[in-house]
């Protein structure tokens, strides 16, 4: 039971980490493209 809870927490953490990574790369791409346009 405890192991299952731990596993679920890890999955949630991992998913949010991936979301943060996606947001960061999207933001970086936007910033870079704006710099390239100028």
Image (tube, grey):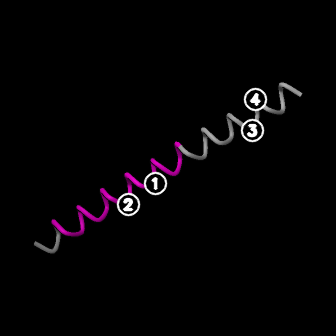
> Which residue lies at the image location 31% right of the left edge and 61% below the top edge?
10
User: Between marks 4 and 2, how big is the CA–CA gap?
Assistant: 30 Å
Q: Which residues are magenta?
A: 4-22
- 1 shown above or below 30: below
Q: What residue would you read off at disc 4? A: 33
Quadrant (top left/top right/bottom left/bottom right) for the N terminus: bottom left
User: Between marks 4 and 3, how big is the CA–CA gap?
Assistant: 6 Å
Question: Looking at the rendering, which quadrant does residue 26 occupy?
Answer: top right
Which circle, 1 or 4, is nearer the viewer? 4
Are dots 2 and 1 in contact, CB under 8 Å?
Answer: yes
Q: Give residue 24's position: percent from left, percent from top.
A: 60, 46
Q: What residue would you read off at disc 3? A: 31
Q: What residue would you read off at disc 1? A: 17
Are dots 1 and 3 in contact, CB under 8 Å?
Answer: no
Secondary structure at numbered mark 2: helix
Are dots 4 and 3 in contact, CB under 8 Å?
Answer: yes
Q: Along the polypeptide, which appears first: circle 4 or circle 2?
A: 2
> Which residue lies at the image location 32% right of the left edge and 58% below the top edge?
12
> Which residue lies at the image location 53% right of the left edge and 47% below the top edge?
21
Q: What residue would you read off at disc 2? A: 13
Which circle, 1 or 3, is nearer the viewer? 3
> Which residue lies at the image location 52% right of the left edge and 42% below the top edge?
22
């Amino acid at each position: 039971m405890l192991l299952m809870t731990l596993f679920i927490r890890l999955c949630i953490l991992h998913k949010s980490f991936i979301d943060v990574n996606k947001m960061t790369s999207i933001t970086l791409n936007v910033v870079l493209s704006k710099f390239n346009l100028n």
